Amino acid sequence: MEGTRDGKVRALLYDVTTVLLLTFGGLLFVVGWLAGAYLLLASRRWRPWEKALGLLVWPLGVLWVYVVPLVLFSCETVVLDGTPFRTTCPAHADWLTPTVMGAAFGLEILVMIVLLLRPRRRD
């Protein structure tokens, strides 16, 4: 079935659906990510290390997008007579949040590319 045109289209659709569910399914109250994880683990199209990478993409990627801004929002500024008097914000909050969020986004994209390209090489 894999050798036919319909089989290749079906395999490509399976791959894309799996990767999209793994990457963005966590935004659907984790149900989408669980469905993507099931599709990934049930498939023989990826090697074990690729499956492990795919399973970590959401917990390590999107989770940072939610957790890292908490560093920025934990800042507190005391205003005295309309003038900022004291800020209890970590010194690294200005550069850490966008850097880590950018790295998490880059990791998401890299894993998506790896998972979509790897099965193509074995066809």
Image (cartoon, rainbow, N blue to C red):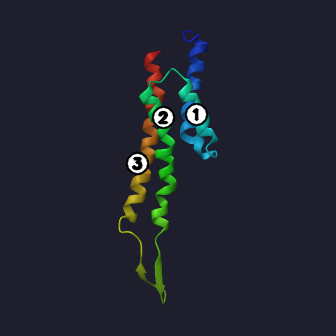
Contact between labelled residues 2 and 1, with CB atoms less than 8 Å apart? yes
Relative to residue 34, is residue 119 drawn left or right?
left
Q: Amino acid at mark 2?
A: Gly
Instruction: Tell which tag, 2 or 3, sits nearer the viewer.
Output: 2
Tag 2 secondary structure: helix
Tag 3 secondary structure: helix
Percent x, y of residue 89: 41, 71
Instruction: Write down the quadrant of residue 17 in the picture.
Output: top right
Percent x, y of residue 29: 64, 46
The residue furthest left is: 91
Residue carrying label 2: 54
Q: Amino acid at mark 3?
A: Ala
Residue carrying label 1: 36
Q: Earlier in the sequence, mark 2 or mark 3?
A: 2
Residue carrying label 3: 103
Up-down relation of residue 118 to residue 83 (above or below)? above
Instruction: Write down the quadrant of residue 26 in the picture.
Output: top right
Badge 2: few (under 14), some or many (20 or more) residues near its Cα, within 10 Å?
Answer: many
Q: Amino acid at mark 1?
A: Gly
Q: Earlier in the sequence, mark 1 or mark 2?
A: 1
Tag 1 secondary structure: helix
Task: Give the residue displayed 51% in from the left and 43% down from the top.
Answer: 58
Up-down relation of residue 41 to residue 99 (above or below)? above
Up-down relation of residue 81 to residue 46 (above or below)? below
Q: Quadrant of the N terminus?
A: top right
Give me the C-alpha separation between circle 2 and circle 3.
16 Å
Percent x, y of residue 4: 58, 9
Q: How many labels were placed on the picture?
A: 3
